[in-house]
């Protein structure tokens, strides 16, 4: 079986067939520049969020075709000796640049640039796009939820609604845009994200009555825990929770019904019982619109799952990996509806005197600096080596800082949840 630690087989077969043909005709050594960009934002979105760069760079270090991977390739009928020799010796020795992870982007933004011989760069396409498309979709959806929450904390809890490894990546992307915690232990271990979780309805149903379940949880976790109070009757559940825990109970969780009404009634009842410091946490298929609808309700935090980690809430961002330069000569695709612009791109973000972003300037030529411009492209890899080695937790923390700064500079219309155009335009130099 192939090694579970190498991402080399996380690729499409056509990468290998192209490589085999290029090796045969001598074009595999041509110096190439590939760019990753999105032609458009998902319908109605005002900005995108770049996420996954750190995960891709982690994977790049282990992108190797060992004997197990080569055996797997041979077993699928790929037996060209020249190709197999190339794969066995593969080491990425090129350069990679891109937007800093966590930055926002717009249509045409060159979020990642790979310069290397074709025989190296072509092998990275599937891995680059699978990581960036997934993580950026989650991050963009999560950023909208954070905006709708208006400072109230959001917790990521979507592990049971997606693939087991996608769950870890989703937790990372959510933390990047401001989610305060995750339910996923692997994400906590790999990236240092705080983890949280108390109990499900099954724990209440396990016990002879609700009081016994609450008492057991309090004995294990202390009075600062969050009790799930809507297994039977929510009002009685709150009364029982306060009776068992006392007025110092940390929080109650509501997971069903009309959450605005339930939260209001819960707050009133808690206050009447003297539990004025007990928080009200809500869950149950929340998305940015549901969170926004709860803005006036006495809610202290949100648990978000399905709508964050699935396609319903995180539509694909449609990033592509296109060859734009070959041996220093710009090349471009001219297919209708899928045209590309040749030449390696330069990008800056224009700001007004108050620091608000006004335009994304993307050009195949260097952009003359203007007042308040911010250069967007930073070096990531040189000659196959990371420019700035960091632990996974450090990379995530840096990306979160980048995101906070980039979002703070967006114009007010970026926060609208209604459908509309990109918050700023992408313009030529």
Image: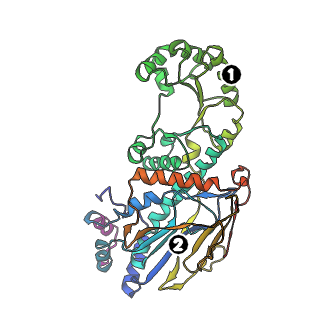
Q: Residue at x 56, y 58 (%)?
A: 103
Q: Residue at x 42, y 42 (%)?
A: 188
In this view, the residue farthest toward the top is 243
User: Is the residue 226 above or below the residue 207 in the image?
Assistant: below
Of 146 and 164, nearer the camera is 146
Q: Which residues are magenta?
A: 69-80
Residue 312 seen by the camera: no
Q: Residue at x 45, y 19 (%)?
A: 218
Q: Which residue is mark 1?
A: 265
User: Is the residue 391 above or below the residue 198 in the image?
Assistant: below
The local secondary structure at tag 1 comes to helix
Q: Which mark is residue 35?
A: 2
Q: Position of residue 30 (x, y in %)?
A: 42, 84
Of 354 and 342, nearer the camera is 354
Count the numbered circles shown: 2
The local secondary structure at tag 2 comes to strand
Q: Residues within 10 Å of mark 2 (few under 14, many from 20)?
A: many
Q: Residues within 10 Å of mark 1 (few under 14, many from 20)?
A: some
User: Is the residue 331 above or below the residue 360 in the image?
Assistant: below
| The N terminus lies in quadrant | bottom left
Of 301 and 418, nearer the camera is 301
């Amino acid at each position: 079986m192939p090694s579970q630690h190498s991402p080399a087989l996380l690729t499409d077969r056509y990468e290998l067939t192209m490589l085999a043909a290029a090796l045969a005709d001598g074009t595999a050594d041509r110096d190439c520049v590939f760019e990753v960009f999105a032609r458009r934002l998902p319908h109605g979105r005002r900005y995108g969020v770049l996420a996954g760069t750190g995960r891709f760079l982690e994977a790049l270090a282990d992108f190797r075709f060992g004997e197990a991977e080569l055996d797997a390739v041979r077993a699928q009928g790929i037996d060209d000796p020249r190709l197999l020799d190339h794969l066995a010796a593969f080491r990425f020795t090129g350069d990679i640049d891109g937007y800093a992870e966590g930055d926002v982007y717009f249509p045409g933004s060159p979020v990642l640039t790979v310069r290397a011989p074709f025989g190296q760069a072509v092998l990275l396409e599937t891995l680059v796009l699978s990581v960036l498309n997934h993580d950026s979709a989650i991050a963009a959806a999560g950023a909208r939820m954070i905006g709708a929450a208006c400072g109230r904390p959001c917790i990521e809890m979507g592990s049971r609604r997606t693939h087991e490894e996608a769950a870890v990546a989703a937790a990372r992307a959510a933390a990047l845009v401001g989610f305060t915690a995750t339910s996923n232990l692997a994400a906590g271990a790999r990236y240092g994200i705080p983890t949280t979780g108390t109990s499900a309805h099954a724990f209440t149903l396990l016990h002879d009555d609700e009081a016994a379940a609450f008492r057991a949880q309090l004995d294990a976790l202390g009075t600062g825990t969050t009790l799930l109070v809507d297994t039977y009757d929510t009002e009685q559940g709150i009364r029982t929770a306060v009776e068992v825990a006392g007025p110092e109970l940390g929080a109650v969780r509501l997971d069903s019904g009309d959450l605005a009404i339930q939260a209001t009634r819960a707050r009133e009842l808690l206050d009447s019982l003297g539990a004025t410091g007990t928080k009200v946490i809500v869950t149950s298929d929340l998305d940015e619109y549901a969170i926004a609808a709860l803005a006036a309700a006495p809610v202290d935090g949100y648990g978000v799952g399905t709508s964050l980690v699935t396609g319903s809430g995180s539509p694909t961002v449609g990033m592509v990996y296109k060859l734009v330069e070959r041996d220093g000569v710009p090349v471009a695709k001219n297919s209708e509806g899928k045209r590309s612009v040749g030449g390696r791109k330069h990008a800056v973000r224009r700001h007004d005197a108050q620091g608000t972003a006004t335009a994304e300037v993307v050009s195949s030529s260097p952009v003359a600096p203007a007042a308040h411009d911010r250069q967007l492209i930073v070096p990531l890899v040189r000659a196959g080596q990371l420019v700035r080695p960091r632990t996974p937790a450090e990379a995530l923390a840096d990306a979160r800082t980048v995101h906070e700064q980039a979002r703070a500079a967006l114009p007010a219309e970026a926060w609208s949840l209604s459908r509309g155009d990109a918050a700023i335009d992408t313009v030529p130099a």
